[in-house]
Amino acid sequence: MERRRLGRLLFAIVFSLAAAGPAHAQSFGFPWWRDAQFQKELVLTADQSTRLDALFQANMPGLRQGRDELDRQESELSRMITIGADEKQVTKQIDRVETLRASLNKTRTLMLLHMRQVLTPDQRVKLNKLYEQREKDRDKPRDGRGRGRQ
């Protein structure tokens, strides 16, 4: 059962990262290592915060550039489909788009792996718990109008 929950959590993190823009570090949607609450709860050292930020900053230009290129290639694919391009050309463009997407996701996932390696095992467990709590909070109904997430 615990293994299944961990699998779902990892899938959720990877899926969120794949779907999210490159400005999202971890799956929290903000640079969590700079947040005072996260620093306190994880007992992050100044060195760890500095190293996490350096990893994030080192990867952001490439991720942004990759996202921009992916957007261009997806636009080209849409254009080709709209004009009724030949299937062989469309297939080549699909391959370009998916290769870029895979590369971008690989880079982002490796960045997250390297960031997690800065943390101690205990900090990783606490980070997972913070993530789970944040997800639960997002799913809570707001003002009686349904789920927090749309």
Image: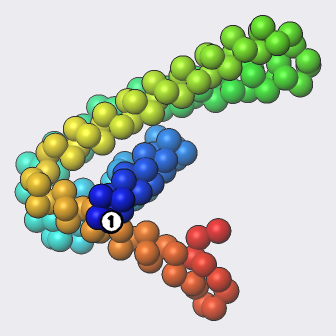
Considering depth in this image, is 140 or 66 the residue closer to the camera? 140
Q: Secondary structure at mark 1?
A: loop
Display colour scheme: rainbow
Q: Classify 142 as above or below 15.
A: below
Residue 144 showing in the rendered view: yes
List x then y, in percent, for residue 36.
Answer: 22, 68
Vertical relation: 2 (above or below) 108: below
Q: Which residue is mark 1?
A: 1
Hey, which quadrant is residue 70 in on the image?
A: top right
Residue 75 locus on image (x, y percent): 73, 26
Residue positioned 89% across, 25% down in the render: 82
Q: Badge 1: few (under 14), some or many (20 or more) residues near its Cα, within 10 Å?
A: few
Residue 63 seen from this side: no
Q: Could you tell whether 73 is left or right of 131 in the image? A: right
Coordinates of residue 30 in the picture (x, y in percent):
39, 56
Q: Up-down: is 34 above or below 51? A: below
Q: Residue furthest front?
A: 1
- Count the labels in the image: 1
Q: Would residue 148 be found to the left or right of residue 23 on screen?
A: right
Name the quarter where the N terminus is drawn: bottom left
Whether residue 6 sits left or right of residue 122 in the image: it is right
Asked if 88 appears above or below 8 in the picture, the reply is: above
Residue closer to the observer: 90 or 61? 90
Observer-nearest residue: 73 or 84? 84
